[in-house]
Image: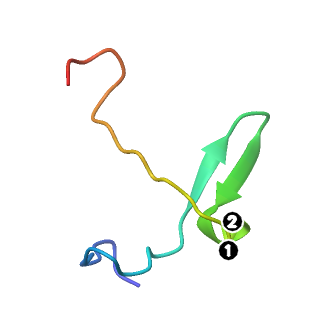
Amino acid sequence: MSDTTDLTAGAPAPDFTLPATGARTVSLHDFRGRKVVLYFYPKDDTPG
């Protein structure tokens, strides 16, 4: 997979892994079969 992926509304999100608290990681596939809300924001403490 390349670094950029075209996303289409309603299509499944590509799998990804991110750091979590406690020196753990969390992956989207950890939530397979469950509803998940992904929320993206530019920075903490910014308006909007």
- How did the renderer colour the structure? rainbow
Residue 23 is marked as none
Which residue position holds label 2?
31
Considering only vertical position in the picture, is 26 above or below 44? below
Query: What residue occupies the far top of the structure in this picture?
Result: 45
Considering only vertical position in the picture, is 38 above or below 33? above
**Picture quarter containing residue 32?**
bottom right
Q: Position of residue 38 (x, y in %)?
A: 45, 52
| Residue at horizontal 25 percent and vertical 18 percent from the top | 46
Q: Position of residue 39 (x, y in %)?
A: 41, 45
| Residue at horizontal 41 percent and vertical 85 percent from the top | 1
| Residue at horizontal 67 percent and vertical 67 percent from the top | 34
Q: Are marks 1 and 2 in contact (CB under 8 Å)?
A: yes
Residue 32 is marked as 1
**Picture quarter containing residue 19?**
top right
Q: Is residue 28 left or right of residue 5?
A: right
| Residue at horizontal 36 percent and vertical 81 percent from the top | 11
Mark 2: few/some/many CA within 10 Å (<14, 14-19, 20+): few
